[in-house]
Amino acid sequence: MKTVTIFFLVMMVQVLGYTQSNLSTTLSITSENEESICADVEITNNNNEEIKILGQNVRLFYDSKNLSIDNITLSEGTAPSSYSLEIISEESNLSKKGGAQLSFEDNLGYVNYNVNLDYDYLFDGLIHPTETLSVQSVCFNKKNKDVSIDAIVLAEDGITNKYSRAFTVIESAPTKQDLILPTTLTDLEYQEELASLNQ
């Protein structure tokens, strides 16, 4: 049993070690008018192999003097049939001194949400090499009609680290990596695996 546990932990470290490998996250405007602005959170796979999104922890800063959050919804890439979204925290009108790393630091808004893989349907959350996938839509109400996408920023090292040391995290794994995990074996296969390890 100890060998199976150690093997499981080693394999999980290998999967989680792949977490941020050559993945980039960006915001892309999908609609804008005088009253609102919506942007997609997009993930680009810069790896040489297909990957599966296992989960995300997304952090956004925004200008709360000129914007207020309307809604956050799952997009095609993280379909509601497989994924769920949970808002962890939401703050507005924060004043942080970060050496003007963000131009709106006197009126910081902040939202942190998780996206979890609940049901592993085959094609949901797959990103092919060099492909960009829309994973969430974030919409804001405008308090000032002239505000732009520059007033919304994904938490990222070198851009928001003066305000928080936590950044957007993507958990993923290559789809062609063979993992032998006890949780994926039938009861009979699991018993056989245990028996062979104990010999």
Image (tube, helix red, strand yellow):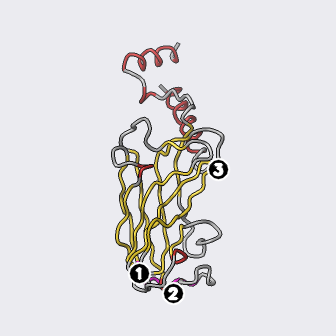
Check the image and report above or below for 6 versus 114: above
Residue drawn where x is 51% and y is 78% of the image: 148
Residue drawn where x is 52% and y is 74% of the image: 149
Dot 1 corresponds to which residue?
34
Mark 1 / mark 3, whichever is N-terminal: 3
| Magenta residues, start to end | 92-97
Point out residue 44 in the picture as x, y percentages from the top left corner.
Answer: 58, 52
Which mark, by number, is residue 106?
A: 2
Asked if residue 95 is among those painted magenta in the image, a careful observer would answer yes
Which mark, by number, is residue 22?
A: 3
Point out residue 85 in the picture as x, y percentages from the top left corner.
Answer: 36, 56
Q: Are marks 2 and 1 in contact (CB under 8 Å)?
A: no
Q: CA distance from mark 2 to mark 3?
A: 33 Å
Given the image, on which type of amino acid does mark 1 rest?
Glu
> Of discs 2 and 1, which sits in the foreground?
1
Asked if residue 6 is among those painted magenta in the image, a careful observer would answer no
